[in-house]
C-alpha cells in the first residue's frame, strides 16, 4: 500500500487500499495501524482534511476495526539487528 507522508498531530503517513477497503496510518512512535471496512468517501475526507488528526480521532479511531501491523519496538529491534546482527 502506498503511504502518503503527513504531519498532523501524531500522524506521519496514511494510505488506502480501495479494493480491500483498508486504511493504514503510521503514528509518530513508529506504530502502523490498519483499519478495515473504511469506505472511499471517508478516505477522501480524511486525506483531504486540513485537520487530519482531529478527523482521525473523531471519525476513524474508534469507528472501525483496527489491527496493529507494526510497532516501534519491532522496527527498533530490526534496525539494531541490521547493524549488529542477531544474538
Image: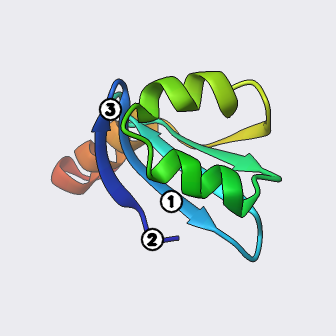
Disc 1 element: strand
| Alpha carbon distance from label 3 to label 1 | 14 Å
Nearer-the-camera pick, 87 or 81 = 81
**Sequence-first disc among 1 and 2:** 2
Mark 1 Cα-neighbour bin, 10 Å: few <14, some 14–19, many ≥20: some
- Indicate the position of residue 27 as horizontal and vertical percent values: 41, 34
Tell me: 39 left or right of 34: right
Mark 2 Cα-neighbour bin, 10 Å: few <14, some 14–19, many ≥20: few
**Sequence-first disc among 3 and 1:** 3
CB under 8 Å between callouts 3 and 2? no
Q: Quadrant of the C terminus?
A: top left
Disc 2 element: loop
Name the residue that disc number 2 marks: 2
Outermost bottom residue: 19
Mark 3 Cα-neighbour bin, 10 Å: few <14, some 14–19, many ≥20: some
- Indicate the position of residue 34 as horizontal and vertical percent values: 65, 47
Residue visible at 56% across and 31% down in the picture:
56
Q: Could one spot residue 53 in this view of the protein?
A: yes
- Indicate the position of residue 24 as horizontal and vertical percent values: 57, 51
Give the number of callouts. 3
Nearer-the-camera pick, 81 or 5 = 5
CB under 8 Å between callouts 1 and 2? yes
- Indicate the position of residue 28 as horizontal and vertical percent values: 33, 30
| Alpha carbon distance from label 3 to label 2 | 18 Å
Name the residue that disc number 1 marks: 15
Residue visible at 44% across and 35% down in the picture:
52
Name the residue that disc number 3 marks: 8
The residue mark sitting in front, 3 or 2, is 3
Residue visible at 40% across and 33% down in the picture:
72
Disc 3 element: strand
The residue mark sitting in front, 3 or 1, is 3
The vertical placement of 82 against 80, above or below, is: below
Amino acid at each position: 500500500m502506498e503511504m502518503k507522508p503527513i504531519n498532523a498531530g501524531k500522524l506521519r503517513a496514511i494510505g488506502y487500499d480501495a479494493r480491500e477497503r483498508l486504511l493504514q496510518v503510521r503514528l509518530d512512535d513508529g506504530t502502523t495501524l490498519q483499519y478495515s471496512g473504511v469506505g472511499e468517501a471517508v478516505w477522501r475526507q480524511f486525506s483531504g482534511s486540513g485537520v487530519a488528526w482531529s478527523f482521525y480521532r473523531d471519525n476513524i479511531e474508534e469507528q472501525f476495526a483496527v489491527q496493529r501491523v507494526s510497532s516501534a519496538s519491532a522496527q527498533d529491534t530490526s534496525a539494531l539487528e541490521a547493524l549488529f546482527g542477531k544474538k
